[in-house]
Image: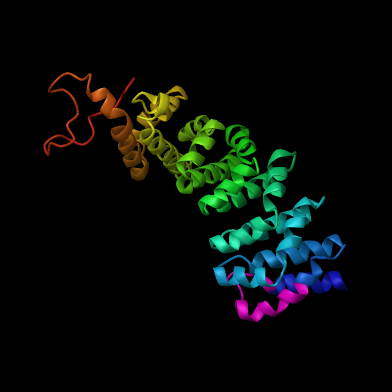
Amino acid sequence: MLRNATWTLSNFCRGKPQPSFDQVKPALPALASLIHSNDEEVLTDACWALSYLSDGTNDKIQGVIEAGVCSRLVELLQHPSPSVLIPALRTVGNIVTGDDMQTQIIINHQVLPRLMNLLSNTYKKSIKKEACWTLSNITAGNTQQIQAVIDANIIPPLVTLLQNAEFDIKKEAAWAVSNATSGGSHEQLKILVNQGCIKPLCDLLICPDPRIVTVCLEGLENILKVGEADKNVGNAEGVNLFAQMIDDAEGLEKIENLQSHDNTEIYEKAVKILETYWLEEDDETMPTGEGFNFGGSEVPSVPTGGFNFN
């Protein structure tokens, strides 16, 4: 009977379009109790119900948080049954799409070691993909939250998935890494580089998904900015070391090839990166009158056939 009641409750919470949150919000106290059940079917349906309720605006997410379910949801990320783990993970992932304070509540409940476990061990593809998606929403947070991900030692397994996993997982891992480069400090970006993120980001520049190519370009551009800022510091001797690493990872060649990409955003971003980080050093060796002149109104902004720095 409890199974049937939980299943019915779950169905009330789902639907496209979703039911009004005010109509289904009264189910939250019951669901907060049901997720402590020992019955797998009850747990599964209760977690799916919470995933439907948390899928949306920050006020919905806040309602789910205030029901007091976060601690138990994070606990369920180590449940042996995928049928429970997946909706629990989906709900956690939905909560961290909220604002930084809402995300922090989940971090405070020790979600990062659980996510580390999901990335590192032999879980099915859908779980690893969902775990990477959840992480991408955490790395989209503030520098303290990015630091928490680094401190939990999650970057190495994330980079391994970015390099070696199936494409569906690689896509989410690319978002997680690129988001970290976007909101991270210079020191945090150096840690990402030291933990091997450049090569797999470069490798994905030839993938068929234009959105992921853009995400990887943005990540590499953020890394190049840090290399540029540091090129007159320490042993860099006026060289952007990260530009050199991207070249060594065959990234420069791939970025050059993106100048002929059908997608305008990708083409323009590739040109901008090449102009900013590679053209300057090659300009000095070009014959007078035959170089690129980006200041002159009569010269096209891109030479025919694009830039080639090899």
Q: Is residue 145 above or below residue 296?
A: below
Q: Nearer the viewer, residue 54 or 235?
A: 235
Q: Position of residue 72 (x, y in %)?
A: 76, 61
Q: Nearer the viewer, residue 179 or 2?
A: 179
At 57% across and 32% down in the image, what residue appears?
A: 195
Residue reaching furthest to the front: 234
Q: Position of residue 32 (x, y in %)?
A: 76, 70
Taken as a whole, is the magenta stretch helix, strand or loop? Answer: helix
The region drawn magenta spans 13-31
Query: Quadrant location of residue 307?
Result: top left
Quadrant where the C terminus is found in the figure:
top left
Q: Say whether residue 248 is left or right of residue 150.
A: left
Quadrant where the N terminus is found in the figure:
bottom right
Q: Is residue 40 above or below residue 121?
A: below
Q: Position of residue 265 (x, y in %)?
A: 35, 45
At 46% across and 33% down in the image, what residue appears?
A: 206
